[in-house]
Amino acid sequence: MIDKTIEAALNAQVEKEARSSHFYLAMASWAENKGLNGTAEFLYRHSDEERLHMLKLVRFVNERGGKAVVPALESPISNFSGLQDIFTTLLEHETNVTASINEVVDLCLKRKDYTTHNFMQWYVAEQIEEEALARNILDKLALIGTDKGGLYLFDRDLGQLQPEA
Ligand code: OFO
């Protein structure tokens, strides 16, 4: 049976992953409305993947004899000043998610829950990938600056890029 403190921490993480999915969905929709179809594709996929991150936690909590809580979500920010704003916001958001995952890992060690600790290692690795990808995208955007041709190619390439699952 899962420790109640760990269960609460995992349910808080369920909410964060759900909010990530919601947030990236709003970003994808913004990009689609701006005609940035490649960026929109990338963000729609990213949103789907965040939902899978949430689902993985939900199922783990239930399998361990806990009770997963499906959270209520408020509407995310849906207005952005441009791609730089989108990916800076995304990176900030992911940095916060990483911090909260690290707290869950820390709690697992304190409560000697090595099963959950092991399970959480997938999320630790995933966060490294997600932060690196967001930084990489921001570096590209900085190189492109206001060059319209560069932006066109950036958007096209992003549409083909798979966010880490
Ligand atoms: Fe779930 O990896 Fe981003 O938030």
Image (cartoon, rainbow, N blue to C red):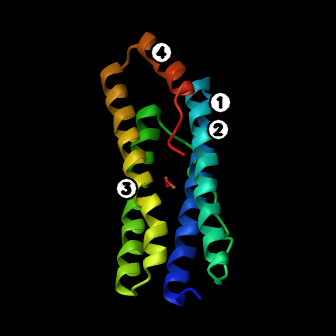
Q: Amino acid at mark 2?
A: Ser
Residue drawn 45% across the image and 46% down it: 90
Task: Classify mark 2: helix, strand or loop.
Answer: helix
Task: Give the amino acid at mark 1.
Answer: Asn
Nearer the N terminus, badge 3 or badge 1? 1
Residue 44 is drawn in which quadrant? top right
Q: Secondary structure at mark 3?
A: helix
The structure residue drawn at horizontal position 56% and vertical position 86%, both measured from the top left corner, is 2
Instruction: Please tell me which residue lies in front, 42 or 108.
Output: 108
- Seen from the viewer's position, the closer of residues 104 and 60 is 60
Asked if residue 10 shows in the view, the reply is: yes
Q: CA distance from mark 4 to mark 1?
A: 18 Å
Residue identifier under label 1: 33
- In this rendering, would 159 be left or right of 144? right
Question: Which residue lies under the disc numbered 2?
Answer: 29
Circle number at residue 153: 4
Dot 1: few (<14), some (14–19), or many (≥20) neighbours within 10 Å?
few
- Residue 125, relative to residue 60: is it above or below? above
Q: Residue at x 64, y 57 (%)?
A: 75
**Circle 2/circle 1 CB separation < 8 Å:** yes
Which label is found at residue 47? none
Quadrant holding the N terminus: bottom right
Q: Secondary structure at mark 1?
A: helix
Q: Are marks 4 and 1 in contact (CB under 8 Å)?
A: no
* Distance CA(mark 3)–CA(mark 1): 27 Å
Determine the CA span between mark 3 and mark 2: 23 Å
Residue that numbered label 3 is attached to: 95
How far across and down, in percent of the image, does residue 31 sit?
59, 32
Q: Nearer the viewer, residue 111 or 148?
A: 111
Give the amino acid at mark 3: Thr
